[in-house]
Amino acid sequence: LSNNNNNNNTTIAIAQKASQEDQAGNYEEAIQSYQHAVKYFLHILKREPQGKDGNQKIRDTCKQYLDRVEHLQEYLDNKEVITLHFISCGHYCLR
């Protein structure tokens, strides 16, 4: 039981860190933390089944985190392209 609580507490702490970094605009750190949290959640699913409802909640949370990672990565990729375009043009040249 102690190991289960440790895994759950660690996962919650990582998820909270991801959310805090996301809200602070530290998107690269948020991406890493969301991915890390998903790994922990998947470990919990594999090693410490939570029952049908609990397992579904974990899966739903993982999907939300992965969707957020995808959204943040797209944002960062687009931001990089715009920044590079700005550097090459000397001003924003939006097409």
Image (cartoon, rainbow, N blue to C red):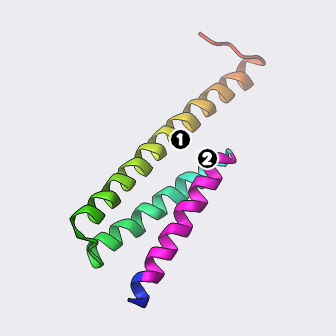
Query: In the image shown, does 87 or 67 lie closer to the viewer?
Result: 67
State the residue lying farthest toward the left.
52
The image shows residue 26 at horizontal and vertical percentages of: 66, 49
State the residue lying farthest toward the front.
53
Instruction: Name the residue located 66 percent from the left edge and 28 percent from the top edge.
Output: 84
Judge whether 18 appears above or below 76 on screen. Answer: below
Q: Is residue 11 left or right of residue 80?
A: left
Q: Is residue 71 left or right of residue 84?
A: left
Q: Give the number of the disc on residue 27.
A: 2
Sequence-wise, the earlier of marks 1 and 2 is 2
Kindly check if marks 1 and 2 are in contact, taking CB atoms under 8 A apart as contact. Answer: yes
Between the residue at mark 1 and the residue at mark 2, the CA separation in whole angstroms equals 6 Å
The image shows residue 27 at horizontal and vertical percentages of: 61, 47
Which quarter of the rendered picture does the N terminus lie within?
Answer: bottom left
Query: In the image shown, does 8 or 42 lie closer to the viewer?
Result: 8
Q: Amino acid at mark 1?
A: Leu
The residues colored magenta run: 5-24
Report helix, strand or loop for mark 2: helix
The residue beneath circle 1 is 72
Query: In the image shown, does 50 or 93 lie closer to the viewer?
Result: 50
